[in-house]
Amino acid sequence: MKQEAPTSLGGSSSQDIKNRHQDIKKGDLGGYVESERNLSQYDNCWIYDNAIVFGNAKVIQSANVCEYAQISDNAIIIGYATIMGHSKICDHAKIGGRALIAERAEIDENAELLDSNDYITLTGFGLTHNTITFFRGEEEICVNFCGYHGISVKEFRQKIAASHNHDIELEYCAKEFEMLCDLAEYHFQKETVNH
């Protein structure tokens, strides 16, 4: 079960931080944390704007969380990763390297994204024009979209085919999702060849 974000916990720097985006001085206000354990007190990481980190989630090393991003559960943001927009990172997800997670990406389960090439986010699809995120799972490409969290592309295709076959508009969406799955599989195949 996903944790609900705390409503009014703010954070301020307890020390000067030489961050890659800006220098943060002791006492500068940042985003929101549930407790000090959510943001390393010894590294150059920072939470900006209205971003929030809660539960057992941690932001460490030189990572940044900004805008309206939410980091929760046991997620870890490390390295030089930046999480921004309205992105949500939860469960046991680990985001690191120089990964840039933006827009409305949702990364969960046991995803481990250490590079921006480990995921793609596409916006404006389906009847409600939502965001769909494809990412490298432990053994296969996974999908997050409207209630489908961390399922394989194969399983996503099956669920869409079964639920989108009784209406012309839904059939159009199903075809669109098929093409997006093909694109994601092609994209990650290309990345495997280049590595």
Image: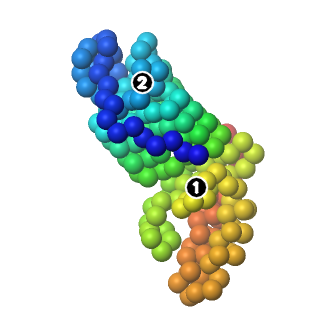
> Could one spot residue 119 in this view of the protein?
yes
- Amino acid type of the residue tagged 1 in the rendering: Asn
Label 1 neighbour load within 10 Å: few <14, some 14-19, many 20+? many
Compute the Cα span from label 2 to label 1.
Answer: 28 Å
* Quadrant of the snapshot with the C terminus: top right
Percent across and percent down for residue 67 are 33, 41
Left or right: residue 72 versus residue 48 is: right
Label 2 neighbour load within 10 Å: few <14, some 14-19, many 20+? some
Q: Tell how many labels.
A: 2
Q: Which residue is mark 1?
A: 144
Q: Secondary structure at mark 1?
A: strand
Q: Secondary structure at mark 2?
A: loop
The residue located at (24%, 21%) in the rendering is 28
The residue located at (64%, 51%) in the rendering is 150
First in sequence: mark 2 vs mark 1? 2
Q: Is residue 9 above or below residue 15?
A: below
Percent across and percent down for residue 163 are 65, 76
Q: Which residue is mark 2?
A: 35
> Could one spot residue 64 in this view of the protein?
no
**Comparing marks 2 and 1, which lies closer to the viewer?**
2
Residue 95 falls in which quadrant of the image?
top right
